[in-house]
Image: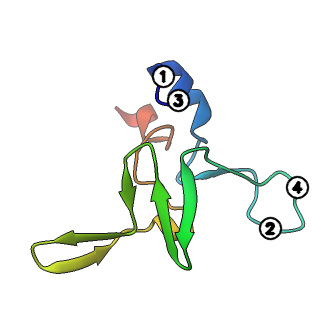
Amino acid sequence: MSNLNRNDIQEAIPPGPYCYFGSRNPADKSYKPCPYWKWVSKRKARCAYLDIEDDVEDEHGYEPLALWDQLKECGINDGDELYE
């Protein structure tokens, strides 16, 4: 995916505030995770687009991100573009 242009990336990343298409309901077959998002371990995920994982160490210790619950950190297609 590293050879994708900006338009390809924006099409690949789901719209809305989460890192998936469709519903998170297990009975709903429309669920499809973002191609850049994946589980690393239990309650720890990775975003290959941003090259980050949930536990990012800062000067104060570990500050968990919200990747494990598939809350978007990249800001692409999150709907805020409408207000810019």
Residue at 40% x, 54% y: name it: 73
Q: Residues within 10 Å of mark 4 (few under 14, many from 20)?
A: few
Residue 48 location, x and y as percent? 46, 47
Q: Name the residue nearer the viewer: 57 or 74.
A: 57
- Tag 4 secondary structure: loop
Residue 81 location, x and y as percent? 42, 34
> Of callouts 4 and 3, which one flags the residue occurring earlier in the amino acid sequence?
3
> Of callouts 3 and 1, which one flags the residue occurring earlier in the amino acid sequence?
1
* Disc on res. 25: 2
Q: CA distance from mark 4 to mark 2?
A: 8 Å
- Residue denoted by label 3: 10
* Disc on res. 3: 1
- Whether residue 62 is visible, yes or no, is yes
Q: Identity of the amino acid at label 1? A: Asn
Q: Identity of the amino acid at label 3? A: Gln
Residue 10 location, x and y as percent? 52, 29
Q: Residues within 10 Å of mark 1 (few under 14, many from 20)?
A: few
* Disc on res. 43: none
- Residue denoted by label 4: 29
